[in-house]
Amino acid sequence: MKTPGLILAPIWLLAGCSTTPGDIYVRTQTEEAKAGNHWAEFKLWDAYANGANGVAPNAAQADQWLNQFVKDVYVVRFAPANGFHPKNAMDYLNNINQHTPQVRSDNKRIGVSGFFRTTVAGDKLVTSCLSNEPDKLQGFIEQNPDLKFISSERMTPQSFIEYEQSRQESL
């Protein structure tokens, strides 16, 4: 005797009623993104670009969400000053926390600072981070006697991908 569940399951799937973990993830993040959560845009880009969280890769969807995410994102670069010689990312982060603890990420977007990176430039370790508030971040950097502001540039989808794939460097 066949059970009704075994007969109905293929009909349910053919009708497009499947709910996979990936479907649930996309639906939840899409709702968050529509409500103004920019981290959800990032998570959707990551899911579609990398096949993360049970979501099948989809280049068109990845491009859509990345374009949305980087719309208001800048990369802000700065360097050590006045005898400050950080050797690694933690040296920078401890200094920033000491002088300007308000330099941090927001719950629903990058905010003042996120995606912190360090890069070796000659004999110095310079740093950059992404920001939705580059002028505010520049002001905080300029208030810190151990840091020197270098530049602020709007991100593009391609520059974001390159930045996101970059590694932390140390001296």
Image (tube, rainbow, N blue to C red):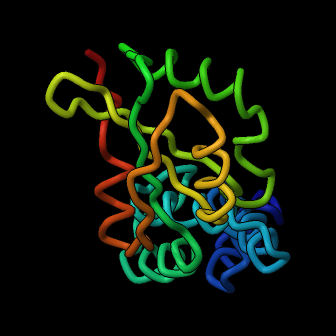
User: Quarter of the image holding residue 123?
Assistant: top left
Q: Nearer the viewer, residue 147 or 15?
A: 147
| Residue that appears at 38% across and 75% down | 156
User: Quarter of the image holding residue 49?
Assistant: bottom left
Viewed as shown, does residue 74 lie left or right of 72? Answer: left
Residue 39 position, x and y percent, is 68, 59
Residue 29 position, x and y percent, is 72, 65
Residue 91 vertical placement versus 63 (above, below): above
Residue 81 vertical placement versus 34 (above, below): above
| Residue that appears at 78% across and 40% down | 102
Residue 159 position, x and y percent, is 32, 66
| Residue that appears at 40% across and 83% down | 60
Viewed as shown, does residue 158 lie left or right of 145? Answer: left
Q: Nearer the viewer, residue 40 or 105?
A: 105
| Residue that appears at 49% across and 47% down | 129
State which quarter of the image contains the C terminus.
top left
Residue 136 position, x and y percent, is 69, 59
Viewed as shown, does residue 116 lie left or right of 156? Answer: right
